[in-house]
Amino acid sequence: MTRPLERGIDPIFINRWSPRAFDESGISESELLQFLEAARWAPSAYNAQPWRFVYARRGTAHWQPFLDLLVPYNRDWAQRASAIVFVLAAQKFTPEGAAEAIETGYAAYDTGAAVAYLTLQASISGWHSHIIAGFDRDAAKTLLKIPEGYAFESAVVIGRQGDPSTLPPALQERETPTPRASLEQLVAEGVFTFK
Ligand SMILES: Cc1cc2nc3c(=O)[nH]c(=O)nc-3n(C[C@H](O)[C@H](O)[C@H](O)COP(=O)(O)O)c2cc1C
């Protein structure tokens, strides 16, 4: 067991993990939008909601061009997934009543929270997801027609878990939920006591 708990928590948190073996299932737009609906409810500074998502589903005209944006290491396993969602953060936000847009300084932080919600909902709904940073940002900006003022934060590969034997041997060995540092290594009362 790679995920022993130190405290009782809802199992949704440890059930979510990031496999690389997917089974080439298709995904309906409605299922995918359910995961993005969860992302929509994340908290953000000023409630600015800086996250933006641009997706492609397997079996559509967008799929292969999206897949081609990934670095070869990621493309090799993501080709058997069901959807790729590129995640962007708006760099500026205009508060209500303000004349000028401001940088909240938290766009990346907020967008990470939205992605966490997305991945948890996918897991709750019986799917798996794998966040990736390995893709060509310049090519993605051109293909997806991203205007100025938005930054790529990550992409999320979503699919149904598949047979690990579809992966190269080195990745087969890693096809298992990862452990975590202990609470003691991460949490202190009152004073920062970590090494
Ligand atoms: C911002 C970010 C970028 C990542 N980039 C990649 C990637 O390019 N390729 C990859 O295989 N995994 C990538 N990962 C997945 C992590 O390695 C994985 O989430 C981590 O090992 C924890 O495992 P778990 O998600 O199974 O709990 C990325 C994760 C995050 C949050």
Image (cartoon, rainbow, N blue to C red):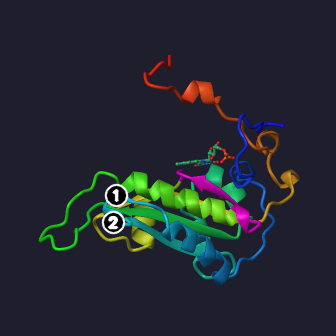
- Is 26 colored magenta in this rendering? no
Could you tell me which quadrant the N terminus lies in? top right
Residue type, label 1? Ala
Answer above or below: position of 185 versus 60.
Answer: above
Q: Is 8 above or below relative to 100?
A: above
User: On the rendered structure, is 87 left or right of 16?
Assistant: left
What residue occupies the far front of the structure in this picture? 190
Name the outermost residue toward the left.
99
**Which residues fall within the magenta stretch?**
123-134
Point out residue 133 in the picture as x, y percentages from the top left corner: 52, 51
The foreground one among 63 and 16 is 16
Residue at image location 49% in from the left, 72% down from the top: 54
Q: Is residue 104 left or right of residue 153?
A: left
* Residue 25 in the figure: left or right of residue 79: right
Q: Which residue is mark 2?
A: 48
Q: CA distance from mark 2 to mark 1?
A: 6 Å
How many numbered tags mark residues here?
2
Give the structural element (helix, strand or loop) at label 1: helix
Question: Residue 107 has which mark?
Answer: none
Whether residue 94 appears in this view of the structure is: yes
Can you give x and y, in whole percent of width and height, for residue 174 in the image? 77, 41
User: Which residue does the image show at 76% across and 44% down from the upper left?
Assistant: 177
- Residue 168 locus on image (x, y percent): 80, 46
User: Residue tagged by mark 1?
Assistant: 45
SS category of the residue bearing label 2: loop
The image quarter in which residue 172 lies? top right
Q: Residue at x 35, y 65 (%)?
A: 47
Does the residue at mark 2 contact the one at mark 1 (Cβ under 8 Å)?
Answer: yes
Foreground residue among 152 and 96 = 96
